[in-house]
Image (tube, rainbow, N blue to C red):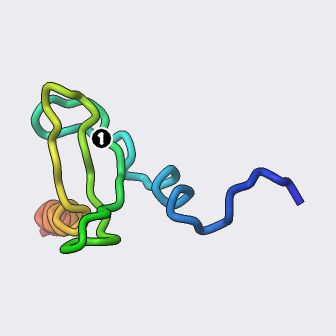
Amino acid sequence: MGGGGEIVGSKATLEKNCPWNGSPCKRCDVGRVVRTSQQPHSFGEKFLSCPNPKCRGFQWMKDALKESIEQQTQRTT
């Protein structure tokens, strides 16, 4: 085996390979990163976070997906 130390399908792999990584922040246009909530009220939920310390934009992944589907639907109708 490759011995890379990373389990296939792990949280880190999924976040790193997510197509939303690098998507532009709505507030400052810097590429966002996918993260997983560690807070008790939202543990395990994915969200998009802007790495720009002056911005710190935030969007739940489920809201980003919903918005994307709505935009695609509007384009096809």
Indicate the quadrant where residue 8 lies. bottom right
Crowdedness near tag 1: few (<14), some (14–19) or many (≥20) residues, C-alpha within 10 Å: many
Taking the image as shown, residue 16 lies to the left or right of residue 20, namely: right
Taking the image as shown, residue 36 lies to the left or right of residue 64, namely: right
Q: Is residue 29 above or below residue 37?
A: above
Q: Secondary structure at mark 1?
A: loop
> 17 or 68, which lies in front?
17
The quarter of the rendered structure image containing the N terminus is: bottom right
* Image point (74%, 54%), residue name: 5
Q: Which residue is mark 1?
A: 32
Q: Inspect the image, locate mark 1, and give the three-letter code of the amino acid beneath it.
A: Arg
Give how far across and how far down residue 47 sits, in percent: 27, 58
Give how far across and how far down residue 46 sits, in percent: 31, 63
> 4 or 67, which lies in front?
4
The quarter of the rendered structure image containing the C terminus is: bottom left
> 39 or 12, which lies in front?
39
* Image point (31%, 35%), residue name: 31
The residue at the far right in this view is: 1
Q: Is residue 46 above or below residue 40?
A: above
Give how far across and how far down residue 62 sits, in percent: 22, 69
Indicate the quadrant where residue 61 lies. bottom left
Q: Is residue 26 above or below residue 66?
A: above
